[in-house]
C-alpha cells in the first residue's frame, strides 16, 4: 500500500502559477504510475496528467492542460509534482494525486487504487 499527501494548493490570479506536491509513504514509490485528477464544484472528477512508473518519465496530459501543466516525479524523495502555469479560472478545483500499480500510465480513475485527500486550487479572474 501507499499513502499520499498533497500540498501546494491555494488562491492565485489568472495567469499565475502554482506547484502542487504529493508525497508518498513507503519504499516502493517507483513501482507506481502516478496521476493527477481534479474535481470542480458540481462536476465529475477528471483526469489531468499522468507519469509512468519507473524512470522512463513517459507522461500523458488532458487536452485542457497540455502546454500549461507539467507533471514530474522525484523518486529519491517519493514525491510527485504538478507545475501549473498560465492558470485560468476554469482550473479551479480540488486536485488529487493518485497511485496505480495496475498500469504504467493511465487516464482511468478506476485503475488508481490509492488516492490523496486533495488540495484546493482557486484561480481568480
Image (cartoon, helix red, strand yellow):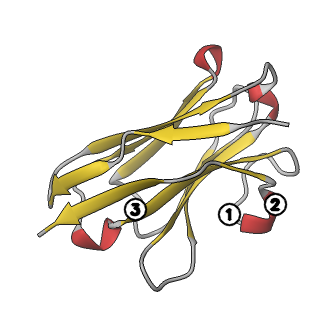
Distance from Cα at disc 2 to Cα at disc 3: 21 Å
Q: Secondary structure at mark 1?
A: loop
Q: Which residue is mark 2?
A: 111
Mark 2 Cα shell of 10 Å, populated few (<14), some (14-19), many (≥20) = some
Residue that appears at 73% across and 67% down: 108
Q: Position of residue 68 (x, y in %)?
A: 33, 54
> How many callouts does the rendering have?
3
Q: Which residue is mark 3?
A: 65
Residue depth check, mark 2 versus mark 3: number of the one nearer the observer:
2
User: Which of 12/117 is in front?
Assistant: 117
Q: Quadrant of the C terminus?
A: bottom left
| Nearer-N-terminus badge (2/3) | 3
Q: Which residue is mark 1?
A: 107
Q: Residue furthest bottom?
A: 42
Residue depth check, mark 1 versus mark 2: number of the one nearer the observer:
2
Residue 122, quarter of picture: bottom left
| Nearer-N-terminus badge (1/3) | 3
Residue that appears at 35% across and 39% down: 19
Q: Secondary structure at mark 3?
A: loop
Q: Position of residue 123 (x, y in %)?
A: 22, 62
- Residue 14 position (above or below residue 39): above
From the viewer's perspective, tell me whether residue 8 is left or right of residue 85. Answer: right
Q: Secondary structure at mark 2?
A: helix
- Residue 45 position (above or below residue 53): below
Mark 1 Cα shell of 10 Å, populated few (<14), some (14-19), many (≥20) = many
Residue that appears at 49% across and 83% down: 43
Distance from Cα at disc 1 to Cα at disc 2: 8 Å
Distance from Cα at disc 1 to Cα at disc 3: 14 Å
Q: Position of residue 84 (x, y in %)?
A: 33, 48
The reply to whether dot 1 and dot 2 touch (C-beta < 8 Å) is: no
Amino acid at each position: 500500500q501507499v499513502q499520499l499527501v498533497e500540498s501546494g494548493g491555494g488562491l492565485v490570479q489568472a495567469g499565475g502559477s502554482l506547484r502542487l506536491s504529493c508525497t508518498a509513504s513507503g519504499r516502493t514509490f517507483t513501482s507506481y504510475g502516478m496521476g493527477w485528477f481534479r474535481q470542480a464544484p458540481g462536476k465529475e472528477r477528471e483526469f489531468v496528467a499522468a507519469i509512468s512508473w519507473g524512470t522512463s518519465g513517459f507522461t500523458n496530459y488532458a487536452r485542457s492542460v497540455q502546454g500549461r501543466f507539467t507533471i514530474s516525479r522525484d523518486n529519491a524523495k517519493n514525491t510527485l509534482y504538478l507545475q501549473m502555469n498560465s492558470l485560468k479560472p476554469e482550473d479551479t478545483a480540488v486536485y488529487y494525486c493518485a497511485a496505480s500499480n495496475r498500469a504504467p500510465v493511465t487516464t482511468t480513475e478506476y485503475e488508481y487504487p490509492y488516492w490523496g485527500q486533495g488540495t484546493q486550487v482557486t484561480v481568480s479572474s
